[in-house]
Image: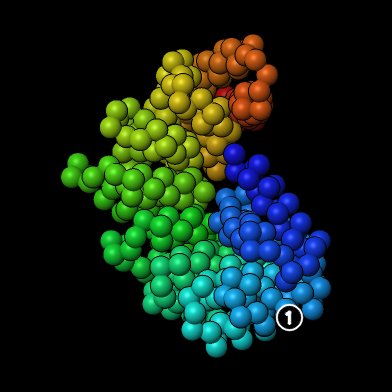
Amino acid sequence: GPGLRRLASKAAIQAGIDGDLGALNDTRKDLVANALQYISESSLGHEYPGSKIRPETLERLMNSGLLRDRVIGIQLIPSVQNDGEFAYKKLMDILQNTEDHQETTAVLRALRSSADARLLFSIGDLKRIAKLSETGTSDVRRASIQLLGCFGGDVTAVKALIDRDFRLIGFSEYEAAFAALGRARVLQQEVAALIETEITRQVRDEVRMDESYVVEMCALLEAARCLGRNLRIDVTNSIRQLPRDYKQDDRVKRASLRAYCATATPSRQVVEYLTELFTSPPVIMLAELAQSLGTFAENCRQSVECVMACVESMSPLRETAKSLHMRLSKREVTDDNEFMVTELRDGIYEISQIIVTFEEFIKPV
């Protein structure tokens, strides 16, 4: 799983640092390089996970005649000193002077791994990264988009992502762009409108359901979930249909349930739909179903009107969820099952709190 691979990658990086990186053989350097790349792409966080390295080790790597050594060294620049100023100046200088796309990608990944270095970014720096996201090679474009995603509270970065023509980019960049937009803290209305437009485009009958479709659709649905804004009813109705469409990939079905609970405006119909799923839970979506109650409860809590629109139909939902919780609790103890049991228990508690709060404080006399 991703967690285990991240631990293995961290161990590989640390083993290289504990030794002399510059003196490692080719095989071990490849392991460190691959580990750094995996950490950068990890959904569990991209901050540099290792300890500090010696300045002389970095200098040896940077002065190497081998591109791989320099790429490793660039990604380790943030680990030389505690303050971000050293990393920022060093990395931006390399970005200014290198013409190699692998070194440029390494710089972008290193900046993404250093929160201290990113604190020193200017508007001009963001515009420079935005330009690279359009003009660079494919690896540079993707890394640039991912770096822009670290600036979800900056209008310059978010607007640069919104303004792209998503019909003209590959699914790898598409996935990175919507992963970034899902974390936007500014221009959220514009981001939500873009997600609505793209979902509507993707669910058309003439769209081919190949691997690129699956990647892009999952990216859209996950962005919608992370953004956490209620979408237009026609869009959420389209999302609601995806789990029942036999042509859809299981990954899309699972992502659609997560997104629906976060984006559908709370109503009796939404609660009844969830109750139906809990009554006959699809095996492939058990984990997502277990998480759905907590997500939907958070969606409901955005306003009293949302609570009042659906609270009276929540009791049957809670009972079917409790029944599923009881069945899962009797299963063999595994990490996956314990995760589902815990998530479901917490979700039942959240729904119960809404019901109790409504009864005691909100319900009209």
State whether residue 39 appears in this view: yes
Residue depicted at 69% across the width and 76% down the height: 61
What kind of residue is marked 1? Glu
Q: Nearer the viewer, residue 247 or 19?
A: 19
Image location (x, y in percent) of residue 335: 66, 27
Image location (x, y in percent) of residue 10: 71, 53
Give left or right: position of 202 versus 309: left
The answer to whether residue 355 is above or below residue 160 is above
The answer to whether residue 198 is above or below residue 95 is above
Image location (x, y in percent) of residue 13: 71, 58
Image location (x, y in percent) of residue 334: 66, 23
Q: Quadrant of the C terminus?
A: top right
Residue depicted at 73% across the width and 80% down the height: 59
Q: Nearer the viewer, residue 243 or 49?
A: 49
Residue depicted at 46% across the width and 21% down the height: 283
Circle 1 residue? 59
Q: Residue furthest front?
A: 25
> Which quadrant of the view contains residue 203?
top left
State whether residue 229 appears in this view: no
Q: Nearer the viewer, residue 84 or 354?
A: 84
Give left or right: position of 144 versus 211: right
Give left or right: position of 53 versus 185: right
Q: Quadrant of the N terminus?
A: top right
What is the secondary structure assignment of the residue under circle 1? helix
The answer to whether residue 4 is above or below residue 55 is above
Residue depicted at 39% across the width and 48% down the height: 215
Could you tell me how many numbered marks the image carries? 1
